[in-house]
């Protein structure tokens, strides 16, 4: 056998070596599995081309020819599958679509296997080393080229549409590999099939194209990390972050920059980074000297500064620098640039809203205080007599309904006074109602000075007043009544427009309760009415007996 015979075998072994290298040097992922199956199918073609030349038996030659062209169907379909997985659209290969897309590649090899009436291939000179091709071969060739063109088109569109330089470089290498294979297949068809009767057979063209394309893939795998799933995942995550990320080596040279940072910073990989270039002409919120001192002189520590850019639009930015440590040694640093303008805007709006709310709360507190004071006044007005300031009859009745019943229930002695200013009508007639009002108020003041803190004084009506005395025996009640009567009698009233002081007397009726055996606890209002009638009778008795006296009833 001549040297040309061994050329395909050499290409086969080279492809096999690349296959083993890929298996041994990379972590196997789903994309690796697709590529390795595809790579294995590429190895079959040069092996079959070599095997055809090692045997003189036509049946074996035909077997290797059929195997080679079945393999081409797998290669063409594998290209498309690999391309779809490479650009990250594997979800596109749903069952129905995959079946429709790859059914030609599954059906056409049947034509090569069965070779009905030599419609695929016929021997020349009794063997298949030299052979002629029929209609099924050309159909198979058209399908093969269609798959390759589809792969080229998909990759070309991806290179045009993607903004990631890394992804562009990766796909460009694979695109070059497919293009090389496409060119060598076309050359093989033209030179060894179409022009076979005019030119000698040139072996190994397709095999060489397969090898060169495989070399492109291996370069892409190791130089551009096409299949490095962790690197791809990390880079994709970094590129999708809104946080600007800049990775520097120990010489402050840019080794990585994410997409979020590119619109705001004019740097490329390989440029030298100067932190000072981003500090002038801005408002410094944090301490600049402290930040720069930490950044320059203590690179192993984290540093942070907040800036406000005022060009075009106001932007709040936080720059953070953190060291990258490997085994305790700093090998670089990560600089992050975070736009917090929206956060600051929300904080300012929240602060403003809080201030507004505080002002409203203060207003509400003032209003509440005013309402409280007003309610206090209204309550006071509802409970007291406006002229004298003592309690009114309504309040006294409410209190007595509760107090008297408690006294009866627990047998606590108490007393009720009902007093009336003697000859008050003469005061009004002789001096006028204003003087009469002064007489009433002065009399109330004199009475209050004689009462205990627990006693309740109420205006019963007109010039009549009632006093409730809790915890008071009949003897105590008589003593207190005399003291009240004496205080009023001694009180000298100086009224306007009256040349001399006025003196008045009072008549008083007293009801003292010290026996509770016959008291009715079931009807408080009825019982109170009875008490009021009793004390009223005592008062009228005092008036009828000549006034300025006390009439006492003990029950």
Image (cartoon, helix red, strand yellow):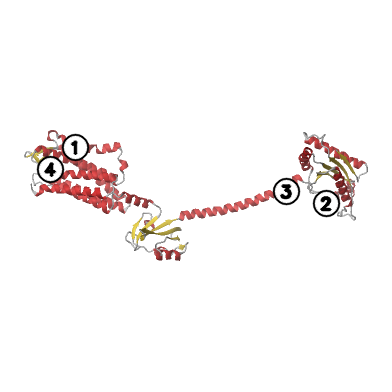
Residue 37 percent across, percent down from the top left: 23, 43
State if disc 2 and disc 1 touch (CB < 8 Å): no
State if disc 1 and disc 4 touch (CB < 8 Å): no
Position of 91 with respect to 184 (left or right) is right
Q: Mark 4 vs mark 1: which is more N-terminal?
A: 4
Residue 51 numbered mark, or none: 4
Q: Residue furthest left?
A: 125
Q: Nearer the viewer, mark 2 or mark 3?
A: 2
Q: Nearer the viewer, residue 62 or 20?
A: 20
Position of 134 with respect to 364 (left or right) is left
Crowding around mark 4 (Cα neighbors within 10 Å: few <14, some 14 to 19, many 20+) is: some
Q: Mark 1 vs mark 2: which is more N-terminal?
A: 1
Crowding around mark 1 (Cα neighbors within 10 Å: few <14, some 14 to 19, many 20+) is: many
Q: Nearer the viewer, mark 3 or mark 1?
A: 1
Q: Residue at x 93, y 42 (%)?
A: 545
Disc 3 target residue: 377
Q: Nearer the viewer, mark 4 or mark 1?
A: 4
Taking 378 as reference, is 319 above or below it?
A: below
Residue 412 percent across, percent down from the top left: 80, 41
- Measure the alpha-carbon separation of dots 2 and 3: 24 Å
Q: Residue at x 26, y 52 (%)?
A: 222
Disc 2 target residue: 449
Label 4 residue SS = helix
């Amino acid at each position: 056998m001549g040297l040309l015979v061994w050329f395909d075998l050499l290409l086969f072994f080279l492809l096999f070596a690349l296959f083993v290298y890929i298996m041994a040097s990379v972590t196997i992922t789903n994309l690796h599995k697709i590529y390795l199956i595809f790579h294995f199918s590429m190895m079959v073609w040069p092996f079959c081309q070599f095997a055809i030349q090692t045997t003189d038996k036509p049946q074996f030659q035909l077997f290797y020819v059929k195997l080679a062209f079945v393999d081409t169907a797998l290669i063409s379909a594998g290209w498309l599958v690999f391309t779809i997985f490479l650009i990250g659209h594997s979800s596109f290969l749903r069952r129905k679509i995959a079946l429709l897309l790859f059914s030609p590649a599954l059906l056409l090899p049947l034509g090569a296997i069965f070779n009905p009436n030599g419609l695929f291939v016929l021997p020349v000179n009794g063997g298949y080393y030299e052979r002629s091709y029929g209609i099924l071969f050309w159909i198979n060739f058209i399908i093969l080229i269609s798959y390759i063109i589809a792969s080229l088109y998909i990759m070309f569109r991806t290179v045009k549409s993607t903004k990631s330089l890394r992804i562009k470089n990766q796909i460009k290498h694979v695109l070059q590999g497919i293009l090389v294979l496409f060119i060598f297949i076309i050359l093989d068809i033209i030179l060894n099939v179409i022009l076979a009767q005019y030119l000698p057979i040139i072996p190994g063209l397709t095999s060489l194209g397969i090898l060169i394309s495989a070399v492109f893939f291996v370069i892409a795998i190791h130089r551009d990390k096409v299949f490095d799933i962790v690197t791809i995942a990390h880079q994709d995550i970094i590129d999708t972050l809104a946080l600007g990320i800049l990775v520097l080596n120990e010489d402050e040279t840019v080794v990585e920059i994410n997409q979020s940072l590119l619109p705001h910073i004019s740097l490329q990989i390989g440029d030298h980074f100067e932190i000072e270039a981003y500090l002038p002409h801005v408002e410094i919120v944090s301490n600049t000297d402290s930040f720069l001192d930490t950044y320059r002189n203590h690179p192993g520590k984290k540093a942070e500064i907040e800036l406000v850019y005022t060009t075009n639009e106001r932007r709040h930015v936080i720059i953070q620098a953190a060291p990258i440590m490997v085994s305790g040694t700093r090998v670089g640093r990560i600089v992050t640039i975070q736009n917090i303008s929206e956060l600051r805007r929300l904080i300012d709006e929240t602060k403003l809203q809080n201030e507004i709310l505080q002002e409203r709360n203060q207003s509400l507190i003032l209003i509440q205080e005013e309402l409280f004071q007003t309610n206090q006044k209204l309550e006071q007005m509802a409970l007291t007599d406006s002229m004298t300031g003592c309690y009114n009859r309504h309040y006294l009745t409410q209190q007595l309904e509760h107090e008297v019943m408690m006294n009866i229930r627990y047998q606590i002695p108490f007393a009720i006074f009902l007093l009336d200013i003697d000859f008050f009508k003469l005061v009004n007639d002789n001096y006028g109602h204003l003087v009469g009002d002064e007489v009433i108020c002065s009399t109330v003041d004199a009475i209050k000075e004689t009462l205990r803190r627990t006693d309740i004084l109420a205006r019963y009506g007109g010039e009549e007043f009632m006093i409730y005395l809790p915890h008071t025996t009949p003897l105590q009640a008589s003593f207190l009544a005399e003291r009240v009567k004496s205080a009023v009698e001694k009180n000298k009233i100086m009224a306007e427009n009256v040349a001399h002081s006025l003196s008045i007397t009072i008549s008083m009726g007293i009801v003292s309760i010290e026996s509770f055996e016959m008291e009715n606890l079931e009807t408080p209002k009825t019982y109170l009415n009875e008490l009021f009638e009793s004390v009223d009778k005592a008062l009228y008795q005092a008036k009828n007996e000549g006034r300025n006296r006390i009439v006492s009833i003990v029950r």
